[in-house]
Amino acid sequence: MTFEGRPNRDAEVVLVGRSNVGKSTLMRELTGHDVTTGKKPGVTRKPNHFDWAPQSFMFTDLPGFGFMTGVEEDHREAIKTDVVRYVEDNADSILAGVLVVDGKAVIDIIDRHSGEGEIPHDVEMFGFLQDVDVQPIVAVNKMDKVDDRDERLNALCERLGLYPPWQQWDDTIAPITAKKGSIEPLNEALRSCFREAKRDDLLQFVK
Ligand SMILES: Nc1nc2c(ncn2[C@@H]2O[C@H](COP(=O)(O)OP(=O)(O)OP(=O)(O)O)[C@@H](O)[C@H]2O)c(=O)[nH]1
Ligand SMILES: [Mg+2]
């Protein structure tokens, strides 16, 4: 099963990340569209596309990978494979891959999965985006729950192979609180990405 029914757009920003990190909540903030969000992981099972006819641009909220209650291991792997394939197949039109992480939990999750021969999902996805030449932007969400902000963000940089301090990566590391609509660092990173790609026509899509 691969995702079907992708609208034909020549510029796209995708949201990827583990389940329950707040991708759909962020999507709602970015687009102003009502998106289904939920307390239970695994709410989004298929890509949600948000486009603006007649402009050839869309945001796509991809299903979460990683742990989901009530979802079999096989199915979880299948979702991840589909997400990877989606990004590979459409890499030419994807300007940025927004990797959404839970700022409170991400370090523990990465460290727990950093065993021998194991690459944590988030680290793997970050590297994968770079491999397929899609600009990675890490939206570090749920910052409202984080009190040691700088330490957290520096630790995340280290895990992703970026030299701290995090402040020098403001095109890549965007601390946000999607739930409260506080996403300006991400908007700024997206604007910078669009300018870099000589797509100033897309600036209208990030407030
Ligand atoms: N504290 C806090 N909670 C948030 C924030 N953003 C989202 N949440 C909550 O996190 C939960 C999951 O949000 P979703 O947007 O459904 O997460 P998702 O990544 O789309 O989840 P899947 O569709 O399962 O992959 C919800 O209970 C949200 O209210 C935030 O900035 N701060
Ligand atoms: Mg979702």
Image (tube, rainbow, N blue to C red):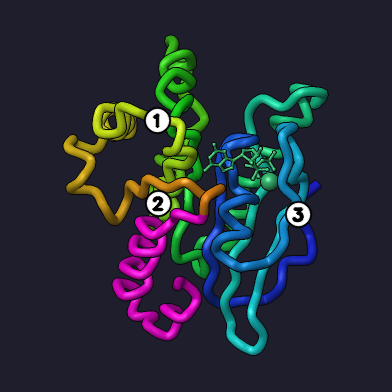
Please state if 24 lies on the left or on the right of 105 as rendered.
right
Q: Tag 1's secondary structure?
A: loop
- Residue found at x 51% / y 61%: 91
Say which amino acid is labelled 2.
Pro
Question: Which numbered circle lies on residue 136?
Answer: 2
Residue identifier under label 1: 146
Question: Which numbered circle lies on residue 93?
Answer: none
Using a 10 Å C-alpha cutoff, classify the residue at mark 2 as few (fewer than 14 neighbours), some (14 to 19) or many (20 or more).
many
Question: Which numbered circle lies on residue 3?
Answer: 3
**Residue 103 point in image, percent of width and height:** 43, 33
Say which amino acid is labelled 3.
Phe
State whether residue 78 appears in this view: no
The chief SS type of the magenta part is helix
Please state if 81 lies on the left or on the right of 108 as rendered.
right
State whether residue 144 appears in this view: yes
Chain-order first, disc 1 or disc 3: 3
Q: Quadrant of residue 64?
A: top right
Using a 10 Å C-alpha cutoff, classify the residue at mark 1 as few (fewer than 14 neighbours), some (14 to 19) or many (20 or more).
some
Please state if 48 lies on the left or on the right of 121 as rendered.
right
Instruction: Tell me the magenta residue range.
Output: 181-207
- Residue found at x 52% / y 69%: 93
